[in-house]
Amino acid sequence: MAQADRRRTIGSLSLAYVLLACGLSVTAALPELRRTVGMSDTVTSLHGSFFGWGLLLGGLFGSRALLRYGRMNVLVIGVIAVGVGGVLFGTAHVVAQSLTGGAAIGLGGAAMVSAIPGLVADRFGPERNAIFTKLNVAPGIGGFTFPLLLAIAPIIGVSWRWPTSLLPGLLVVVFLVSVVPLLGGVTRSAPSVGPGTRMRDVVGLLRLHGVRQRFVLQILHVAIEFSLGTWMVVFLREEGGFSKAAAPIGGAAWAIGMMASRSLVPRLITTFGSRLEAMCLLGGIGSALAILVVPVAPIRLLCVSLASFSFGPLYVLGVERLFVNAEAAGVDDTTAVSSLTAVSSGLAITIGPFVVGVIADRIGLRGALLFSPAAAAVALFLCAVRWGDEAGRIGQTESAPRRVTAS
C-alpha cells in the first residue's frame, strides 16, 4: 500500500472510531434525558440494550452486507447510521425516539465493528495488531470530547441537546466530505471477503474450542466495560455527589483512562506479557469497588480513570486473541471472525447495562454496579483456569513480532 493511501486509510478509520465513541457516549446525557422524559432505571437501561441489539443483529447478518458491498462501503453506511442515531437521541422528547436512536447507533456500530478489524487485517497484514492498537486510541478521543462538551453546555447556558445531536452529525459530514473522496481507490477495490460467509459460518466458529473460549471471555470483557461506563454519569450525578455540570466530567475521566491504556498496550505487553489480562482485571476490580465506596468526589473521579485504565486493554487483547485462535484452528475467513467480534459486543452490551438497570430498580444503583466487578472476577477465574492452554496455542502460532498483543 502506498504511503499516502496508508495515511488516508488510518485517518478514515480513526475518524470512524471517534464517531462511534461519540455515539456510544450519548449515554452521558441519560441523566438529563430521563429527567425530561421520565424514565425508570429499567427503561433507562434499555438504551444500552438497544445499542447491543443493533450490534448483535449487525454481527449476525452483516457478513452478507460485507460480501455484497465490501468493507469500506459498509463502513460508510455504518458511519451514517451512527450519526443519524445520535441526532435522533439528542432531539428526542419521547422514549420511542431515543430508543430508535440507540438502535441506529447500535446497527451502525455493528457495521463499523464488523468492517474495521477485517479491513485492518486484510490491508495491513503483519502490521495489523500495531495498527489496530493505534486505532483503538481514537475512541478515547471521542469518548472524552463528548462528555466534556456536555459538561460545558450548562455553564455557557446551552441545552444538553445541542452537543448530543450536533456533534455526531458534524462528524458524519466531515467524514463524507473530507475523507471518503480521498479513499476512492480503496472504496472501489474488490472486497476481501470469504465467498461463503453467512450467518452459519459466523455461528459455526463457536464449534472451535479456542474461539468459543475467547468468545465467552470477550462477552464478559465488554459487559464489564459497558455496564460501568453506561451508568457512570448517572451514578455520579444521582448518588456520587456531582453537580449537573460536573457529572459528565466523570465520562471524560473514563475516556481518558481508556485512551491512555489502549495507547500503551504494546508497551504493557512487552512489560507484563501473558500476565497483562489478569492484571487488568485485578486492577479494574479494585478500582470499580473504590468508585462505589470512596466518599470524596475528587478521589472517586481518580478511581473512575483507574478503572477505565485497567479495563481498557481488555477489548484490544480480546479481538486479537480471537483472530489468533481462529487462525490457529485453520480459519482464514476474516469476515466471519470480525462478525463474531460484533456478536460478542452486541450480546455484552445488550445484557450488561440492562441487568444493572433491573437490579438498580430493586436495590439501588450503587448495589447494581457491583455487577461489573463481579463479572470481572468471573473473567479472572476463567483466565486463570485456561491460562496455560491459551498461552501455548497463541505462542505456537506466533512466528514474528506482528502480534504484539499475543500472550
Image (cartoon, rainbow, N blue to C red):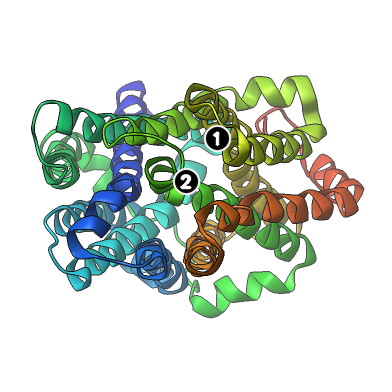
User: Residue shown at 23%/69% (left/top)?
Assistant: 100
Q: Is residue 106 above or below residue 407?
A: below
Using the image, tell me which numbered label, if any, was put on residue 229.
2
- Residue 133's spot in the image, x, y percent? 53, 32
Judged left or right of residue 75, residue 119 is right
Mark 2 surroundings: few (<14), some (14-19) or many (≥20) residues within 10 A? many
Q: Which quadrant of the figure contains the C terminus?
A: top right
Regarding residue 126, the answer to whether it shows in the image is no
Task: Report helix, strand or loop for mark 2.
Answer: helix
Q: Which residue is mark 1?
A: 308
Q: Is residue 370 above or below residue 46?
A: above
Task: Report helix, strand or loop for mark 1.
Answer: helix
Mark 1 surroundings: few (<14), some (14-19) or many (≥20) residues within 10 A? many
Mark 2 touches mark 1? (CB < 8 Å)? yes
Q: Which quadrant of the figure contains the N terminus?
A: top left
Foreground residue among 353 and 177? 353
Q: Is residue 155 above or below residue 328?
A: above
User: Residue shown at 41%/73% (left/top)?
Assistant: 57
**Res. 253 image quadrant:** top left
Q: Amino acid at mark 2?
A: Gly
User: Residue shown at 56%/71% (left/top)?
Assistant: 202
Distance in Å between CA atoms under marks 2 and 1: 8 Å
Q: Earlier in the sequence, mark 2 or mark 1?
A: 2
